[in-house]
Amino acid sequence: MNIWVTEDQTENLRISFRVKTILDHAESKFQKCDIYDTFDFGRLMMLDNVVMLTERDEFFYHEMIAHVPLTVHPRPKRVLVIGGGDGGTIREVARHSEVEDITIVEIDKMVVDMSRKHLPFVACGFDDPRVTLHIADGIRFIQEQKNAWDIILIDSTDPVAFAEGLFHSDFYTSVREALTENGILVAQTEFPLLSRNLIRDIFSSLNQVFPVSRMYLAPVPTYPTGLWSFGFASKGPDPLRDFNVQRAAALAGKLKYYTGDTHRHALTIPPFIRELLP
Amino acid sequence: MNIWVTEDQTENLRISFRVKTILDHAESKFQKCDIYDTFDFGRLMMLDNVVMLTERDEFFYHEMIAHVPLTVHPRPKRVLVIGGGDGGTIREVARHSEVEDITIVEIDKMVVDMSRKHLPFVACGFDDPRVTLHIADGIRFIQEQKNAWDIILIDSTDPVAFAEGLFHSDFYTSVREALTENGILVAQTEFPLLSRNLIRDIFSSLNQVFPVSRMYLAPVPTYPTGLWSFGFASKGPDPLRDFNVQRAAALAGKLKYYTGDTHRHALTIPPFIRELLP
């Protein structure tokens, strides 16, 4: 048996994983979902043939999307996640005892179901009693929210099809309205080495809509180029100035990538990326 | 035309690049060399089907192997590079005006010739008048050197075939003897996410042979997992304590990745790697 699964990461770049077992396939009206067990990366979930997560390296992304805003907000009580139906992001949010309400809005119930069936290491996020799941369109959901959330995390697929609107400035404006006074948005914002125009547009929009906007970086080995960016935008808190060292230290021993040092490191933007930012 | 070139990064992981033009092929008694022009990454050099460098992302590796030790050594005058026949590492070393002698020992003249012919953006390193090239076995060369070099950089291929000895503690002992009083060794040391036993062995050896040993990290998108490690070992200088901020600042505007901030943050080792180190 020599089975390989390949993602076209760009038109010109591919990654391929050798597969132990093809575990499951499902289709919804939004997308198709495949679950594999791979040799180097353990369980792998793909949506429309794009890697969403692997068991071996999901910790980089999930720790970094959650713990940066959660160690910066002065009093994070209500956290909303748009997307993230696998459960990995809410698993990390739930590590913070200050958080009282974790609401997740996933457009596609299939993603949640497939994760619960095959990816217990992330789906365990749904077990926390503070979690409420809505199967709904995040863009519509957010339009009805005003001054409601301390932190909003956009854990989306790439900016194509139904997820495209999650990268537009109209959406960022809705998010700003949905945030409380010191509110923070964090969104996954793709790969700076090759997605240069997209990065320029996203950060220009965030900069127009929010008084504070910053990029931070993390390695994600199975995503294109292995070097991923996140957009941090807020109504006031700054991830460098307002970083709560004690809260970061309280996570020690539980995480594989995030630490207080990682936090500071992630906000260091090298020259080849800095030139894309406002 | 839909031509792709693939590297087997591990037995279970592949990267593939779409090719504009197949530029050249050569074989020596050591290895074979292929040069491609690719869509996303520009010119690409492979040795025995393993990516050595691409035009688009070589700066991460070459800046980081050179500028970390060169901003830490108190008075770097004599620099020896083992391997690195493409010229990218010496191009970066040559940015430091304090350096008087840059000697490069490459085992395979074919690599130098192919780089000079097809990769001017790295081969320009050979143009500096301080550079001397020896076509020789680095392991034998170093055995004859005593108290001769301020900095030795091991810019090698992976630890297989003729390069395997470059990862052993006998070789590190020879390097220590070849270094001057405050001498520094930096070696490329593979990818911590998957090469865990190798990393453990290398850093255990460096720790036994040198009074100071540290790891630092950099993204290299076209290398396996995209997250690369370097071993720093010295007779005294410590890359955190003895870092010359002015010398780093003098490089500003010339580089794409390395800055003083990058330097400090590259030495931040996350928990999943720290557990491998002595």
Image (cartoon, coloured by chain):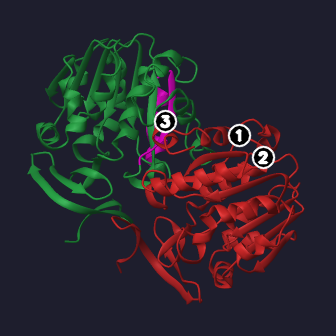
Chain colours: A red, B green
Labelled pair 1, 2 in contact (Cβ < 8 Å): yes
Residue B30 pos. (x, y %)? 14, 45
Q: How far apart are marks 3 and 2 (CA)?
A: 35 Å
Residue beneath the point at 15% across and 37% down: B112
**Rendering coords of residue B120 (x, y %):** 19, 38
- Badge 1, how many Cα within 10 Å: few under 14, some, many 20+? many
Question: Horizontally, is B251 left or right of A147 in the view?
Answer: left
Mark 1, residue position: A260
**Residue sitting at x 82%, y 39%:** A246
Q: Please report the bounds of the magenta region as a residue range.
A: B198-220
Residue beneath disc 3? B204
Q: In the visual, does B192 lie left or right of A13? A: right
In the depicted view, which residue is nearer to us: A38 or B147?
Answer: A38
Asked if disc 3 and disc 2 are in contact, CB closer than 8 Å, the reply is no
- Residue type, mark 2 in image: Thr
Look at the numbered disc 1 and give the secondary structure of its residue: helix
Mark 1 and mark 2: span between their CA atoms?
A: 9 Å
Which residue is found at the position 78% from the left and 65% from the top?
A80
Residue A244 % position (x, y): 80, 40
Task: In the rendered structure, find residue A71 and report the number of the disc placed on it.
Answer: 2
Q: Distance between the residues labelled 3 and 1?
A: 26 Å
**3 vs 2, front mark:** 2
| Residue A94 can be seen, yes or no | no
Q: Quadrant of the N terminus of chain A?
A: bottom left
Q: Which of marks 1 and 2 is nearer the N terminus?
A: 2
